[in-house]
Amino acid sequence: MREATEATRAAVVLAGYGPVGQAFADRLQRDSAALAHRHGVRPRVAAVRASTAQCATGADGSVPPRPQWGPVRPLGETFERTGARVFVQAVPSTPGVRQRAAEEAVAALRRGIHVVTATKSHLLTHWRELAEAARAGGSTIRISGATGAALPAGDLARTSLRGLDCRTVRACPNGTVTFVLDRLAEGGTLADAVRAAQLRGIAEADPSADLSGEDAATKVRLLAALLWGWDPAEVRVRAQPVDAAAAARARDAAARSRRLRAVAGASADEPGVVRVRLEETEPGDPLHALSGPEKAVVFGCPDAGDVTVSGGRSSPVGAALALVKDTVEVTAPRTGFQ
């Protein structure tokens, strides 16, 4: 183990200070000494940018109260002033911020600054441009927070499955829908199931992207891009939503010891297509075993056998921890066992 005094310091510029951004900044500050001791790097949030204001942090990475923030400065100026090594994006995945998120990520990558993002919107539309910018700047982009929060599915798709000839992805990557379907199987209504998920902090205030299958499809589009080099912008999505009619199907499946799941899938043999379907799963299927808001991805590797990853908290803290993990990955010294 390295002593904390030997740790490499890494300045981070954080875009977005909602629940995920706040949890990320808090974790880096709280766990600074532990990260230095375990991984040889001490990342620190040096500046935080919101839509209309920004701030510099304290020497320990503490974020001042919002009334003490100033106006937003040009991003390049912020990078220069902080000596940033990492640009972390925790802004909402909405169409309104897509272009700005893409432009800022490209600017960072071209400067040789690594990008770590939980924001999905610009990954879907600007994948090739982001990859080009990273190559030009000799930098990297990590997207664990966009492919399943604390579920490390993106890591498997990006590196761990290399050489295993993965041919299929079959996933329940949306914890909200899994929770809702289990509530429906117990006899609840769709409205009551969604409300329960919201009260537990599992579902967003607007759960439409979850229930429509859009969010699950997005995550599988990104996993397929990492696995097979697909451009997410060119992927066709065919999704079956979770609606009131799903309640009867969920109860019927439960009566036969099965569980209804919203399964998102893709195959290397059918390029550019992602499907989300309501499927009955049987005991022994990893997707059947999920409970509440758990998530899972099954990577089908014909010769190596299926590789399954499951768990991972669906919460702002789970997404923040994914950002911490990726930040450590792009800044930690790369020697010895890696």
Image (cartoon, grey):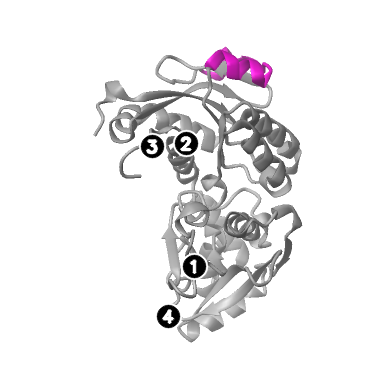
Where is residue 42? Give x, y as percent. Answer: 38, 26
Q: Which mark is residue 283?
A: 4
Image quadrant holding the C terminus, namely top left
N-term-proximal mark, 1 vs 4: 4
Q: Which mark is residue 330?
A: 2
Mark 1, secondary structure of its residue: strand
Where, by quadrant of the figure, is residue 283 drawn? bottom left
Where is residue 288? Give x, y as percent. Answer: 46, 74
Marks 4/3: CA–CA distance: 42 Å
Mark 2, secondary structure of its residue: helix
Between marks 1 and 3 in the image, the one whose residue lies nearer the viewer: 3
N-term-proximal mark, 2 vs 1: 1
Residue linked to disc 1: 298
N-term-proximal mark, 1 vs 3: 1
Residues drawn in magenta? 65-82
Frontmost residue, 18 versus 5: 5
Judge whether residue 77 is colored magenta: yes
Marks 1/4: CA–CA distance: 15 Å
Q: Are marks 4 and 3 in contact (CB under 8 Å)?
A: no
Q: Amino acid at mark 3?
A: Arg
Mark 3, secondary structure of its residue: loop
Where is residue 314? Give x, y as percent. Answer: 49, 51
Q: Amino acid at mark 1?
A: Val
Residue linked to disc 3: 334
